[in-house]
Amino acid sequence: MRRASFAARNALAACALAALACAVQGPVVETKVLEIDPPALSRIAVAPFLPSPKFKGDTPIGESSGAEGAEAAALTTRFVTEAFAAEGFDIVAAGDLVNVFTAAGKPVPHGEVGPFQRVARNEYGATALLTGEVYRYKARQGGEFGATRSASVGFTVVLYATSDGRELWRARFDKHQPALSENLLEARRYPGRGSRWLTAAELARWGARETAKRLLELK
């Protein structure tokens, strides 16, 4: 009877550990495929990312001039562009799209997908347009080996077909770095494997790389 009870407890413990491992090993980036095929990924133009209207940074809401959100969006645009190019995608940088508008003496239509789609298709032969929004970008408080608050980053990306504006794919990265004492298995997934505290930029770069990898799986 005791042996049976001991075996049952072991089985329950093994199931619990397996469930924890599955939870920890889940995707870093949440994705949703709407309608996509490899030709749609032939050349991807990146539009300048924007801060969300509900952007949360280090400055209290109501006291920020908006520069903090704009800087976070610009950095994330660069990180995503570099990550997608590193994964082998043919990329048109956001600056190239912006230059078309400024060269023509037109205002850059931030937040409008249509004008960027047309420029991406007609001027650069892009088959898809990648847009993004950063809703959280908080720096760590403290140093690399002793922080009182971890960095925290959240952003979304959406991919559109330039031919007709269809939404093809979307992804979301939302992470703060946990302490080893908080969750050993989860912390070891991050760059540095939990040996140091990441900056917000390092966390955003990691999110960009993981996002690019998720789309690469569909190519």
Image: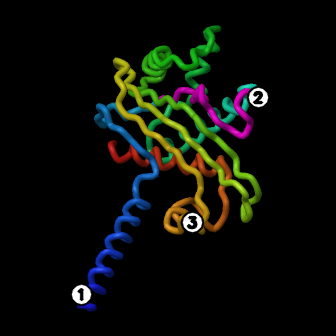
Spot the residue most to the top: 105
The x, y position of residue 49, in whole percent, is 57, 30
* Quadrant assignment for the N terminus: bottom left
- Vertical order, 188 against 57 (above or below): below
Which residue type carries mark 2? Glu
Q: Earlier in the sequence, mark 1 or mark 2?
A: 1
- Vertical order, 193 against 81 (above or below): below
Q: Which residues are magenta?
A: 45-62
Observer-nearest residue: 4 or 57? 4
- Which residue is rendered at x = 47% and y = 49% of the image? 210
Left of 65 or right of it: where is 91? left
Element on which disc 3 rests: loop
Q: CA–CA distance between discs 1 and 2?
A: 63 Å
How many neighbours does mark 2 have within 10 angstroms: few (below 14), some (14-19), or many (20 or more)? few
Which label lies toward us, 1 or 2?
1
Which residue type carries mark 1? Ala
In the picture of the structure, the residue carrying the numbered disc 1 is 4
- Name the colour scheme: rainbow
Which residue type carries mark 3? Arg
Observer-nearest residue: 85 or 215? 215
In the picture of the structure, the residue carrying the numbered disc 3 is 193
In the picture of the structure, the residue carrying the numbered disc 2 is 63
Q: Earlier in the sequence, mark 3 or mark 2?
A: 2
Judge whether residue 98 is colored magenta. no
